Image (cartoon, grey):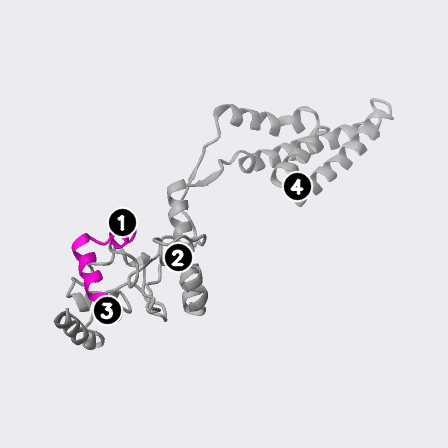
Amino acid sequence: MVAAGRKAKEARLALSDTPMAVPELAADGTTVASVPSALPTRTNRPSLGVQVLSVVWALIPVVTFGWGAPFTFTYAALRLRSRAIALCAGAYGAVAIVSLYLAGNNNDNSWQSNAGAAIAVTAGAVATAQALVMRKRLIAGKAEVDPAIGHATQQLRLRERAREIIAGNPTLAYELQIGRPDRHRRFDDGGLVDVNHVPLDYLVEVAGIDRPTAEMIAEVRDGIGGFTSVDDVSVTLGLHPHALDYAASRLIFIRHG
């Protein structure tokens, strides 16, 4: 064990001169996992029935000579929570009132009656054209994050938050038992594993390190006072530069006792 410790320390002295392709490291030597800002989504397409009903809804203004436009746009405003569409509904409502007044309170052949009818028909045509364009927003399939992708991304975010705690408040990190899945705790660190302190089986089962490598880590870490980074583990144990890439996003290296 003494010889192994001596060799490990010698290897660590050469660490700064050894070029390696490793994941990005934070200031405290922990590996930083990049979290995607946008999640891949899948979209549910509307059914044929919904598409047909949306066309009927859009045609209401023209088949009612514009007088149904306020109801069409009020529904859209509520569904889309749009103030602009609500204003349109109010405008079409005012136009409907004016056209009804002109058409209903004058002789059939008066200019007022003709103007009321023209206003109603024009409003109906314009409102229907606008509604046909707007219907795509109403029936657009709801974009949903794939549950598996959502869970994995959430885990990455939890790890990122835990790493921030480690870097900014090591005492709090210790109290929260970050990186210690072998301890009873309530804080979710996203599946981080403290290489310097967890039992051997957790290096394998949680971090995903192959057992022979995990056994070497467990054998050497106490003799050298713990590792400081993925680089340190790889160089000290003579591993392939990419041997720990798969597990790197879960590994942290805390040097407390």
Q: Residue at x 61, y 40 (%)?
A: 80
Residue kind at label 2, given as amino acid type: Arg
Q: Is residue 114 left or right of residue 213?
A: right
187 to 92, vertically: above or below: below
In the rendered structure, which disc, 3 or 2, sits on the residue that comes first in sequence? 2
**Image location (x, y in percent) of residue 56:** 59, 25
Residue kind at label 4, given as amino acid type: Ile
Q: Which residue is mark 2?
A: 159
Residue kind at label 1, given as amino acid type: Glu
**Cα distance in 3D space between marks 2 and 1:** 17 Å
**Cα distance in 3D space between marks 4 and 2:** 43 Å
Q: Is residue 30 left or right of residue 76?
A: left
Query: Which quadrant of the figure has residue 55?
Result: top right
Q: Residue at x 55, y 38 (%)?
A: 137
Residue kind at label 3, given as amino acid type: Asp
Judged from the image, the secondary structure of the residue bearing numbered disc 2 is helix
Of the pair 28 and 206, the residue shown nearer to us: 206
